[in-house]
Image (cartoon, rainbow, N blue to C red):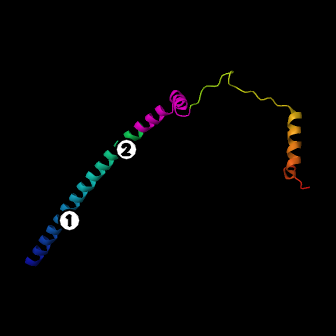
Amino acid sequence: MMRLNLVLLLGVLLSALYLVNVQYESRHLYSELDRARAQAHKLDVEKERLLVEKRAQATSARVEQLAKSRLQMRAANPAITTYVSYTPDAVDATTESAARRNPQTNGRVQ
């Protein structure tokens, strides 16, 4: 009977130690999960901030201002606009003179 009591006591002690170990791991994993959720929230906030900043950078007024300052572009107006008109005769004459200069452009070699 004494052996049985010792075996049962040993079993109870081992199960108690195992239970303590499982609870410790559970608390540790829960704290890691909580930290990961906090990090995910921070990343979501940062993502939203960056999206707002991206939208602000892409406004048409800002793009126009950058085009004027960095690229020295200006708005088109009739005074500086060159108009091109299409005339079929001019195109034919241009292609004929190009074909005489380079016969391969016409699709055949002379």
Task: Say if 11 sits above or below 52 in the image.
Answer: below
Is residue 69 highlighted in magenta?
Answer: yes
Residue of label 1: 18
Task: Say if 65 sits above or below 50 in the image.
Answer: above
Residue of label 2: 43
- Taking depth in this image into account, of 47 and 60 the one nearest to the observer is 60
Q: Residue 19 sits in which quadrant?
A: bottom left
- Residue 1, position in %: x, y? 9, 77
Q: What residue type is labelled 1?
A: Tyr
Q: What stretch is highlighted in magenta?
A: 49-71
Answer whether labels 2 and 1 touch (C-beta < 8 Å): no
- Taking depth in this image into account, of 3 and 106 the one nearest to the observer is 106
- Residue 39, position in %: x, y? 33, 46
Looking at the rendered structure, the secondary structure element under dot 1 is helix
Q: What residue type is labelled 2?
A: Leu
Q: Residue at x 66, y 22 (%)?
A: 77
Residue situated furthest left in the rendering = 2
